[in-house]
């Protein structure tokens, strides 16, 4: 049972798991959209070419969720910190998504 004390978001494991899974789900949804658009893959690509991006992209965006979790303690301070950390988290997720897609699709769709 939770008490009336304020929960520190960096020590509460439910927040960490939620952010990591949310990031991985976002990455999986985006890369699945791109992979499902490929109707006729190049025959020079490996046989199971879809596995690499389906693993790397969600891991990259889950890592961004992990970083955002550790920065979240600064959102509870006064001033511009909440806006700054939120923007930093969004930008970090977009960069992780983009870099995960570059690494995951290297040699196939990303040439």
Image (tube, rainbow, N blue to C red):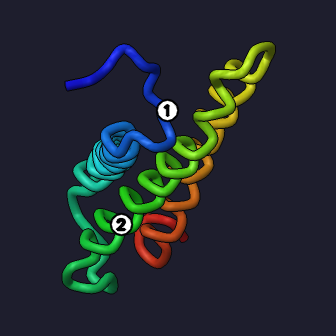
Mark 1 burial class by Cα count in 10 Å: few <14, some 14-19, many 20+: few
To which quarter of the image does residue 93 belong?
top right
Q: Are marks 1 and 2 in contact (CB under 8 Å)?
A: no
Q: Quadrant of the N terminus?
A: top left
- Kindly report which numbered mark, 1 or 2, lies closer to the viewer in this rendering: 1
N-term mark: 1 or 2: 1
Tag of residue 8 = 1
Give the x, y percent position of residue 92: 62, 44
Percent position (x, y) of residue 67? Answer: 57, 50
* Camera-nearest residue between 43 and 69: 69
Q: Which residue is mark 2?
A: 53
| Residue found at x 43% / y 65% | 109
Image: 94 above or below 104: above
Residue 39 in percent (x, y) is at 21, 57
Circle 2: element type:
helix
Up the image or down, 72 lies above or below 6; here it is below
Q: Nearer the viewer, residue 108 or 15?
A: 15
């Amino acid at each position: 049972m939770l008490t009336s004390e304020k929960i520190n978001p960096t020590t509460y494991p439910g927040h960490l798991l939620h952010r990591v899974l949310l990031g991985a789900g976002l990455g999986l949804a985006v890369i699945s959209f791109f992979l499902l658009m490929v109707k006729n893959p190049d025959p020079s690509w490996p046989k199971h070419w879809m596995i690499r991006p389906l693993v790397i992209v969600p891991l990259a965006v889950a890592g961004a969720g992990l970083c955002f979790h550790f920065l979240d303690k600064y959102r509870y301070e006064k001033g511009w910190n909440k806006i700054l950390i939120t923007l930093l988290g969004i930008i970090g997720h977009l960069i992780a998504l983009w870099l995960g897609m570059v690494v995951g699709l290297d040699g196939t769709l990303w040439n």
